[in-house]
Image (cartoon, rainbow, N blue to C red):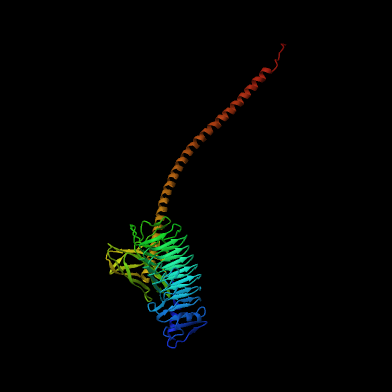
Amino acid sequence: MKKANSASLIIAFLLVVSFLASGRVVVKGNQATWVVDAGGKGNFSTIQEAINAANPGDTIFVLKGVYYESVNLNKPILLIGEDVDSTILDGNRTGNVIDLTANNTRINGFTIRGSRIYPSYSAIRIEHASNTSVSGNKITLNYCGISLYSSYNNTISNNVISYSSVDGISFYSSINNTISNNTISNNYVDGISFYSSNNNTVTGNSIINNQVNGMILSIYSNHNTIYHNNFDNEQQVWNDATSTCSWSYDQEGNNWNDYVGKDLNEDGTGDNTYLIDANNQDDYPLMGKFTIFDASFNKTTYDITVISNATIAAFRFEYNPETGNKIILLNATATGSAFTFCRIRIPTEMMDRPFTVLTGEEEITPTLLTISNRTYSHLYFTYVDGQQAVRIMSSESLRLYVELLDKFTQLQSDVHSINVTYYDLKSNYTSLLDDYNRLQENYRELNSSYQEHLLEFNGSEQNLRSLTYIFVFAMAVLIAVTGYLSSTRTRPTVTTKAK
């Protein structure tokens, strides 16, 4: 899955920095960037003042500081904090910290805290809004972290949501939203809750240490797709028996800390399903934690996903344009396991086969899993040492060599097939020649027999002809004799008188 670049955020930041000293507004085309500084050096000292003055499509850049206010975000604007740890928006327990009711809005780079501790209040309440993005924030110490009401096509990603009095994220009658790559932990009730909410996607999240449930499904919350998440909670999922969801995608499910199945076929997923309830089960539970990393190549950002029973850290991707060589590097640290496994998905557009894998200085032959295709390569490999620097290399020269070797091997196979066909034909020819010789011998025998019978026939014909002549002659004599005798009997008697 390719991730959208944050180019607009970077451009806005660079534009703002160049004008911070003067506190001037930066205008690019019909869009403006407004600077908010609690110390009074920007265009405004409060975020709400900037929102009120901004036009749709503008950017509001908030400098480091603590801003005690509740914000009504009712315009499609880009709201950016200078630094997530030190740009703090505190609702001072008065209500929702941010009420978001506009489409096409972005919130990024804030610590958001201090909503009113009372039902229906949240750090960010999104209501009747679509195509909004909440990313790269720390949301903590609120009644609810983020709540969505009758909203759709929104993205909540790369946030840390913790220590909410109830839920980290709650959905109410909301559809087609994406919750990805967040850490949702230590909330006092549930990590994520769905109420009458369908067709949402939950992927790449760490849903851990929530005190009641990692997730709840209630009131016909169906057809949500939930995969590549790490679950480690008091109870993983609670369902009121009305909801059915999908718990895997592309033969990869979720990591459950209480899964006790085995992986005898060694592919990184469990051989037995993880049973959630009567209506839900994970058919491909992950045998290790899921981690996702970004890698940039040719101005495109790609996702590299890792499933491992080790802790994966220090990820980086290196590319040498002169040689075409590409390397994925990471550190894998495992404790308490007899062996370490890694299952890695690599986009082929970024890095194609064949691969060489090194753990330390030892080369390992990885297994290319059967779900691999022209879009992704899925590699699986194991090693016994619990801590290793792992390198996965793809060489353009080696790729061309293997490609030529494959073609040569195919050519050899074709030549072998031709040889087999030739010898088959030769064997068939020999067999046919033997049959032909036998036929000739049979023909000679039949011809000799025919000649003998012909001679016999000719002799018989001559005898028959002679007999015919004799018969005809005899018949002629018989007819002549018969005629003679007949004439003799019928001739009158002549009397001669004496003189």
As drawn, is 446 to the left or to the right of 381?
right
Q: Which residue reaches farthest top? A: 498
Residue 211 spot, x, y in % from top left:
36, 65
The quarter of the displayed image where residue 237 is located = bottom left
- Say which of 389 and 491 sits in front: 389
The quarter of the displayed image where residue 142 is located = bottom left
Identified at 41% across, 82% down, the residue is 63
- Say which of 189 and 278 sits in front: 189
Q: Give the number of callouts.
A: 0
Q: Is residue 2 visible?
A: no
Q: Which residue reaches farthest bottom? A: 22
- Say which of 358 and 184 sits in front: 184
Image position of 12 with respect to 465: above or below: below
Residue 432 spot, x, y in % from top left:
43, 49
Image position of 143 with respect to 490: above or below: below
Q: Quadrant of the N terminus?
A: bottom left
The quarter of the displayed image where residue 155 is located = bottom left
Residue 94 spot, x, y in % from top left:
44, 75
Image position of 32 with respect to 421: above or below: below
Residue 480 spot, x, y in % from top left:
63, 24
Q: Is residue 432 visible?
A: yes
Q: Quadrant of the C terminus?
A: top right
